Structures are given as structure tokens and as C-alpha cells.
Image (tube, rainbow, N blue to C red):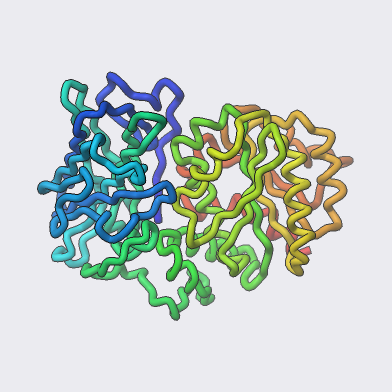
Amino acid sequence: MTVKNQPVPSDDQREVSVSTLLLKGQNCALSAAPVSLTVRAPGVAVDVSALLLNAQGRVRDDDDLVFYNHPQHDGVSIAGQTVTADLNRLPAAVTTVAVVVSIDPQQHGAVFTAAPHLTIAQPSSPTMTFTAPDFIAKETVVVLAELYRRGEGWKARAVGQGYASGLAGLATDYGVDIDDPGPQPPEKLLPTQTRTTATGTAVNLAKVESQAPALLEPARQASQVLVRSGLEGRRAAVYLVLDHDWHMEELYESFAVQAFAERVLALSANLDDDGTVPVIFSSGREPFLEEIRLDNYRGRIGQLHTQVDWGWGNVADAMRRAVTHYQESAAADPAFVVIQVGDEPWDKAEVRSLLQNSAALGVFWLFVGFGRGKLAFYKNLNASTSATFTNVAFYDASRNPGSVPGEQFYNGLVAAFSTWMKR
């Protein structure tokens, strides 16, 4: 999966009521009247379809795929390039309607370059439009937008998520049992195959291919960076800690945190073959521990974070939770704990103490900064020669890490970790 994000919009930009232009990640409130979503794709012939999804981001059964051979189901219909959703008729079990655009399989070898254009229309309401950033990774399928329940109402979200793995990758993510009649992309592999990196080293990505084909491209990028960093064949237990301060709300809403977690999961697939990353949410109360896996990652962060209260992030408690989990697992490999931070910690002394005390435990801490807050504490952890932590690094992933190209992103993630591992 390749996602090119634009800068995360501000609070007043994210909620659109008058403006007619939606940026990627923005949402707008919908009325109860039927909503029409019309697709225009320059230069290629496409098929438009819709997926009716439950709270887990999966179809209830194969009838929840609405397309030209099954053009109507439970209040959602397809007519040519237009999806119409009667929000009043959607069953309560349907929480999301995804609008999907795919290359016509008769166009052998065709891929998206310029992104499809979407128009959202409601009676007596302004028309809204969305054009995703252009695609560069041979995408043949695009999830262009989602309609989703929010409280008692509905919203539309501009998504623009491309799949280079075709309809098969889309089907795996959403639980649809379909045949993909289209040509396979040149990068497509069978589950028993391996992929050769730029350095000529074979890396087995069979589990990613079979369970999460949309993550195949970031997993490949991560594997190339690991090989160049001298970590080929090395193992580590990857953990992810996420800041759940109140100021992070827009980054959860715009999928920025979800996209970040997916990239970490793709890295983990190269370092830890169980396809699972423990996720710890750092909030004002006791850290919330769950996991994200290759077989459940889609929309997982959005599902989990709603179970966590907003508050001032308790980074030290989240770090202790990660260490406890790692020690209880009795893992033989070192731990690589990726901690996303959006602001300065209020418990700085505790954080420093934990970093010092964990140096001999085989735990490496990588603080990844993105968000609105100041991050001077994390940037300066190793600024003083008298307070150098050999098992700690900081990576500034910019305001929106999804806009950082894949291999550049993974270089930032593993550079200091590879040095530490070689010691």
C-alpha cells in the first residue's frame, strides 16, 4: 500500500461545511438525505464499487460488495460511475461505506497515475470535491472515500488510499471472497516466493503477501533499508507506544496515526515473524495495551483509541508497561520500542531514570516525534556527553510522517537502532 498524505489539516479545515474542496484526511458532516458520490478518472477506464463494512472494518458477507454485477444492497446502489447511499436505509450493523475505484481488467497493464476525482452531492447542500495526490507505485485500486457513522449522524472522509496489490489486496483487507480477473502487478508474488532486494539479498515476505498484501510495498522498503543497515537476518521484538494526549485528536481522525502504525507493522514483519506488534496507548490513566497484527491492522488504531480517554500522556508508565510485557514474554531477541511523541513529557525525571535503568535489559528506545507540541526534551536526550544514553535515539518524522517517502522514513527509524544492534 502506498499512501501519499498531504499536510494534516487544522481543526477548522478538517470540518468542512461551506468549502467545496476536501483535502486528503478531511471529513465533512452529511445530512440524512441520499448522498451521491460520482467518480471521474482521467485517462483510464475504471470500475466503481462500494463496500458495506461493520465496526471491525470488514464486510458482513460477500453481498456487502456492491458493483456492476450486484448493483444494489441495503440502501447502497451503483449506477455507472456513481455510488448512491441512502443513509436512512443502512442497517445499524453497517458503520462505514467505502467507495472503491479499480482499473478495468480489460486494460492490460494499466495503472493509476493521476488520481481519480470525486464529487459528493446532497440535496440542498453544497457540492464537495476531492482529488487525491497522484500515485507513483503502480496502484490499480483506490479506496477514494468513506462514509462513516459519527454519533447519531454520518460523515464523509476523503481517503485516497492506493493498492498496488490489486483487488486481491483489497479483498484480503476487507474480508471479501472475490476473484481478481485483472493482470497481476509486476511486483506480485506467490505466497511461497521470496523477494530480492536492491542488494541482491532474498527476503521472505510470504506472511505479508498472504495476510496483508497492501503492506507488501512498505515491508519491501523496510527490508531494503535493513539490509543496507547490516541488519539482514537480525531479529527484534517490536513495540509501539502511541501518544493519546488531547492535542493528538486530529492526527487520529485524519488517519495519520493509523498510517504510522501500519509502517511500523511492516517493519516488524521483517524483524519479528509473528506478524504482531504490541501497542500501548499513553494517556492520563493506566496505559492501555493491545496489539496490531497483519490479519487485523486495517482501521485497528481507530477502533482501539476510542477505548482510551484523552489526557496528558504518561510516557514513563507506558515505558514501564512495555518493559514488563517484554520481560514476561521471555523473548531471547532484543526489544525495539518505537514511542510516538507529540509533546514534552510531564514526567521527565522518570523517563530519564527508566532510560538509564533499561540500558542492560536489551531494550532500545526510539522516540519518534510528530504532532503540534515541543519536543526539545527528546531531541536533547543525547546532547550532553555526561548524560548519553546508548540505547536511545530520536527521529523527527515531521508534522505528518505519511508524507515522508518510504525508504527515507525507514532510514530514520533504524539508523541508530542498527548501530546499537551491531554493538
Q: Nearer the viewer, residue 225 or 3?
A: 3
Q: Nearer the viewer, residue 201 or 233?
A: 233
Q: Say which residue appears at 54% left-offset and 49% top-offset.
A: 261
Q: Give the farthest residue toward the bottom.
A: 192
Asked which quadrant contains residue 288, the reply is top right
Name above or below for residue 179 compared with residue 265.
below
Asked which quadrant contains residue 235, the reply is bottom right
Residue 63 horizontal side relative to residue 189, left or right? left
Q: Is residue 395 visible?
A: no
Q: Is residue 390 visible?
A: yes
Q: Give the farthest residue toward the left.
A: 80
**Which quadrant holds the N terminus?**
bottom left
Q: Say which residue appears at 74% left-offset and 66% top-offset.
A: 331
Give residue 81's position: percent from left, percent from top: 14, 46
Q: Say which residue appears at 78% left-offset and 60% top-offset.
A: 328
Residue 177 horizontal side relative to residue 334, left or right? left
Give residue 50's position: percent from left, percent from top: 24, 49
Give residue 131's position: percent from left, percent from top: 27, 38
Residue 34 horizontal side relative to residue 394, left or right? left
Q: Say which residue appears at 65% left-offset and 58% top-offset.
A: 238
**Which quadrant holds the C terminus?**
bottom right
Q: Nearer the viewer, residue 256 or 68?
A: 68
Give residue 30's position: percent from left, percent from top: 29, 28
Q: Count all numbered tags in the image, as a single digit.
A: 0
Name above or below for residue 56 compared with residue 27.
below
